[in-house]
Image (cartoon, rainbow, N blue to C red):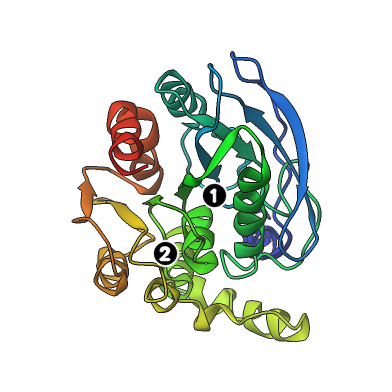
Amino acid sequence: MIAALKPSVLTKLMIVGRRAALDRTPEHAYEDVEFPAADGVELSGWFIPAEGEGRGPAVVFAHGWLWNRLGNVAGQVPVPDKDVDFLPAADALHAAGYHVLLFDLSNHGRSGRRLPITYGINEAADVAGAVAYLGARADVDAKRIGILGCSMGANAAIYARPPVKAILAVQPARLAHFNRNYARDELGPMGPTMLRPVDPLYKLLGAPLPRHHNPAIPARGLSPNTVVQYVQGTGDPWGEMRDVEAMVEATPNALPLIRYESGGRYEGYRYVNEEVADVAAFFTTNL
């Protein structure tokens, strides 16, 4: 019975997501904040102010599918996942003198609805709203804003083409390839066939079709003033290295791709946990 229900459960999660609970808060002083996405959807998050006076640089975190502003807690969805904790990297950036914005993308956490989930295309409005919110704050230097995005959040940062100095894009993905590999891995050889209803549902909802989703296309429109560091796990069974290589090639100012040694998809995301010093150094160098 569970195996029979899994395709329908995954399809529902793909379209409407889930709202993971906020089970922790930052150790440093923070503000509860709300701001609109570029299309008006209300978004919710935490702003962790840097210490000191004057206008300072800021980094916004954009999370992955089914996560929230804290990252991911393993074992809450019907796929093999791992913990991905944003707070250590947020702490490192705070210690380096950065403001940090952790927020929930639409359809996740405590933010508003915009259905269906489009894995970066429409969520670009969330990232654009977060950057605009930071740029309007009196304590933020609007010319020194960076983005750390994982998976859907990385895709959204690319699709938004925001006026920022630096983007750290951890395991962005081309959705048609990701879905095919994901379905085959989780549901067996017939998995991709079982997910065929997804495209008609997206068409019915007036949303971009998953098969048209390709971050390498908007990557060409990123500003040459925006330094982009892509990270892709070597053992990722769902995302494809060649797709991220295509994004690197399309991006006007991309650093060499970091091929992060990993045994699975979520081990690749853990670059954010395990290489905290490198994360902080990237923004310190480029903001």
For the residue carrying disc 1, how many other residues have a C-alpha within 10 Å: few (<14), some (14-19), or many (20+)?
Answer: many
Location of residue 181 with respect to 77 vertically, above or below: below
Q: Which residue is mark 1?
A: 64
Q: Quadrant of the N terminus?
A: bottom right
Q: Which residue is mark 2?
A: 173
The part of the image, by quadrant, that contains residue 277 is top left
Q: Position of residue 10 (x, y in %)?
A: 63, 60
* Residue at 72%, 68% in the rendered image: 116
Q: Secondary structure at mark 2?
A: loop
Mark pair 1, 2: CA separation:
11 Å
Q: Position of residue 191 (x, y in %)?
A: 50, 70
Q: Pick the residue in front: 116 or 14.
A: 116
Compared across the picture, whether 157 is left or right of 138 comes to left
* Residue at 80%, 61% in the rendered image: 40
Q: Amino acid at mark 1?
A: Gly
Q: Amino acid at mark 2?
A: Ala
* Residue at 54%, 49% in the rendered image: 64
Q: Quadrant of the C terminus?
A: top left
For the residue carrying disc 2, how many other residues have a C-alpha within 10 Å: few (<14), some (14-19), or many (20+)?
Answer: many
Q: Position of residue 167 (x, y in %)?
A: 40, 51
Q: Pick the residue in front: 177 or 151.
A: 151
Compared across the picture, whether 57 is left or right of 133 comes to left
Location of residue 87 with respect to 77 vertically, above or below: above
Q: Pick the residue in front: 207 or 83.
A: 207
Number of marks drawn: 2
Q: Position of residue 242 (x, y in %)?
A: 25, 69
Q: Secondary structure at mark 1?
A: loop
